[in-house]
Image (cartoon, rainbow, N blue to C red):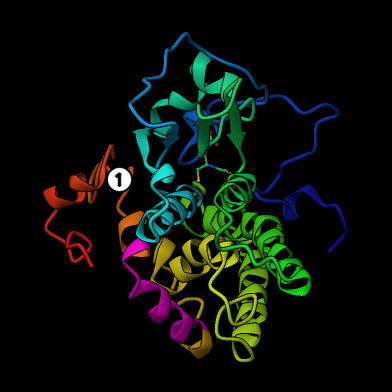
Amino acid sequence: MADNDPLNNQPSGYVLPQVWQWDKSNGGQFANINRPVSGATHEKVLPVGKHPLQLYSLGTPNGIKVTILLEELLAFGHVGAEYDAWLINIGEGDQFGSDFVSINPNSKIPALMDYSTTPPTCLFESGSILFYLAEKFDAFLPTDHHKRADTMNWLMWQMGSAPFVGGGFGHFYAYAPFKIEYAINRYAMETKRQLHVLDTQLSKTEYVAGDDYTIADMAIYPWYGGIVNGAYSAAEFLSVGEYANIRRWMDLLEGRRGVQRGRLVNRASDGLAERHDAGDFDKLSTGATSEA
Ligand SMILES: N[C@@H](CCC(=O)N[C@@H](CS)C(=O)NCC(=O)O)C(=O)O
């Protein structure tokens, strides 16, 4: 079998063109929102509610990192963390509206405006938002030198690693228009390696960055807890039962009201499409509704 034989390619016979061209018809799930250029596609004014913090997001793993932190801040009595959460429907291209793009030129949720500053502060990238809020409220980010470094190490680990889980494994296992063994094997291997990294860490520490519950836990749980809870319907495929330390840590987090509430925000089908104050949770019949 000769190297670079086009018959060995996927699909068979595929030959690399000299210059890549955008094939709009070949995309799998989410093809309608993927483009090779950035920028707004339409004029769209975003709503602004009554609180200084205005969140424009969706209840995906990257979105709920921020709502978990906001709900935890509120649970700890930081009234300045009250927020309005508006739904950005990425399947319908809301992330390409002009106001959204002016907050986040990268057109991805979550995006946050802080109107308590002059001028207002634009925030995007979930890790940046977590860090900003943790600093602003002096919470969930240890001040001790080494603990703070550990927290940031694990926060950045999540930000750098999870795209291989979502954009790599999740895409090729669940969303690509056909199954490609090479791609699935490559990203399943990497996803399991990352799960093992986390499981090994959690065999030594109670929370990810040590004894304290931090923004690193809030960033990591939605992705790796999500996989263990069955994201992409891949729990059996990835043998997630191997990761007992992750399960132990997930149980700790899932017992927290802030986590329970944060997971429900900006979820039109099984939670709150929008959230404007704590009373909104009372409209839901879940365990996250009662005041603790
Ligand atoms: N690194 C970014 C990733 C954000 C991201 O990928 N968001 C996805 C949803 S989870 C999105 O908005 N996708 C819309 C698109 O790609 O057009 C972050 O952590 O904030």
Q: Is 39 on the left or on the right of 54, as rendered?
A: right
Residue 237, image x and y in percent? 47, 76
User: Quick one: which residue is furthest to the top in this view?
Assistant: 43
Q: Quadrant of the N terminus?
A: bottom right
Q: Is residue 60 above or below residue 189?
A: above
Residue 205, image x and y in percent? 61, 87
Q: Is residue 255 magenta?
A: yes
Q: Residue at x 49, y 90 (%)?
A: 244
Residue 231, image x and y in percent? 42, 63
Q: Which residue is mark 1?
A: 267
Q: Is 166 on the left or on the right of 91, as rendered?
A: right
Residue 107, image x and y in percent? 57, 29
Secondary structure mostly taken by the magenta-highlighted segment of the chain: helix
Q: Residue at x 59, y 19 (%)?
A: 102
- Extent of the magenta region: 246-258
Q: Quadrant of residue 47?
A: top left
Which of 186/257 is in front? 257
Q: Quadrant of residue 241?
A: bottom left
